[in-house]
Amino acid sequence: MNQDIRKKFPFYIKNKDVSYLDSAASSLKLKSVIESLNDYYANNGSNIHRGVYRLAYEATNQFEETREYVSKFINSNLNEVVFTKGTTDSLNKIASSYSDFIFEDDEIITTELEHHSSFIPWQVIAKEKKARLKFLPLTEEGKITVENFKKVISNKTKVVAITYVSNVLGYVTPIKEIIEIAHQNGAIVILDAAQAASHLKIDVKELDVDFLAFSSHKMYGPNGVGILFGKEKLLNQLKPFEYGGEMAHLVFKDESSWKDIPYKFEAGTPVIAEVIAFKESIKFLEEISLDKIHEHEMKLRDYTLNKLKDVKGLTVYNKTAETGIITFNIENVHPHDAASILDQNNVCVRAGHHCAQLVAKFLGVTATLRASFAVYNDYKDCDNLVNAIIATRDFFESF
Ligand code: PMP
């Protein structure tokens, strides 16, 4: 990977010795993103879709331009891109709105690999509607397979709520086949792409996915911006998520009507600067290409795993992951304690259940450590991680 990449991330000006390996939680932010945010806040500040003066038009155009970038990025129609606050917001909104079509005895399929935001909304809806929540059995390693999906899908299945890439184990779901089978059985698929969007190319038309969610902050972009993709036909069938400014068409005392999609789903003032700046992330990802980014992250992962295989007292839970995530534990050391010592060695990793408690239960642990690679990481980060793990193990062993 080009050495100049780090220059695009101002983080490294003050933190050049930090090995930031927590990009699966949130990535570092691009200089171009920060400059774009600054530009809007310093030089504009107006609302969008409302004012009829030049600055308001400019803000609206820049905001809508991001929608074009996103729709090209995932190969959707323009009106199929809805801006939300994040993946959690997208998944909750779609679950709550689509629950209108769920009735008693319907089946909802999910997996133990889900992030809480993909699974809990459907757990709650299943209870409310007396529908059945079914879990796709994972393989011994914790993977989702088409074969096991076939065991749980039936013509009673209405929704498949599933992750594209597990945020704990980094496994990639064979989603194209799963979508095909779901459709053959009359079910729709809601895909959590939070951990996929900055690593794997997503083509919603090729996948034929019904709904898809991801977050800008994991893609070198600003916080507070989420994407909800939905097929035009399905979005048109859904009621608005919220009522208020700029989503209504005609308003009378006794009833109101809604704007066309996607605007009927975007009530209120959005995070304007953040949406405008998000297009800088997409430009960056496309300039380098997701294939190259993924290849780079896998090289770093393989290099690290190769070094870790000789380290005693370490359990790696996802040796065969297809994305740049290493999830592990150090024997007899609580992950939070380990993460603190790693931090003293300038290595940032995540510790905990990663908002996916069912995965921890599946692994038979309460928590794990997770190192996740991104475009700006290099072999020095890998060495720092390995050395810090050894130092942590030795530190606790000395007691
Ligand atoms: N799904 C997955 C797989 C994730 O990794 C995350 C973020 N950890 C989310 C959903 C939720 O994303 P956000 O916090 O941006 O709403």
Image: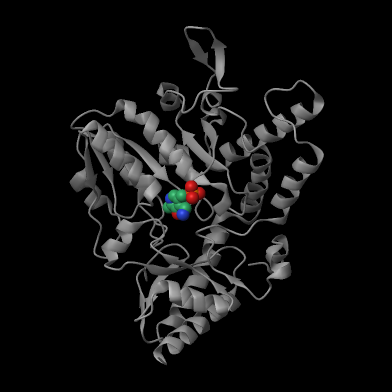
Q: Nearer the viewer, residue 164 or 40?
A: 40
Quadrant in the picture for residue 152 = top left
Give residue 274's quadrant in the image: top right
In the image, 361 versus 61, the foreground residue is 361
- At x 43% / y 35%, what residue is drawn? 93
Residue 166 in the image: x percent, y percent? Answer: 39, 56
Q: How many marks?
A: 0
Q: Which of the image's four quarters has the N terminus?
A: bottom right
Considering only vertical position in the picture, is 251 above or below 155? above
Q: Could you tell me residue 233's position as x and y percent?
A: 43, 24
Q: Residue 283 or 345: which is nearer the viewer?
A: 345
Q: Is residue 253 left or right of residue 161?
A: right
Spot occupied by residue 366 in the image (x, y as percentages of width and height): 32, 66
Q: In this rendering, is residue 99 above or below 278?
A: above
Residue 374, image quadrant: bottom right
In the orientation shown, which residue stands out farthest toward the bottom?
Answer: 398
Residue 242 appearing in the image: yes
Side of 102 where 54 appears, left or right: right
Q: Is residue 195 visible?
A: no
Residue 32 x, y percent position in the rendering: 72, 52
Identify the residue at horizontal 35%, vertical 38% (top origin): 189
- Which residue is rendered at x = 42% and y = 41% of the image? 207
Name above or below for residue 334 compared with residue 215: below
Which residue is at the front of the view, 41 or 9? Answer: 41
Q: Which image quarter holds the C terminus? A: bottom left
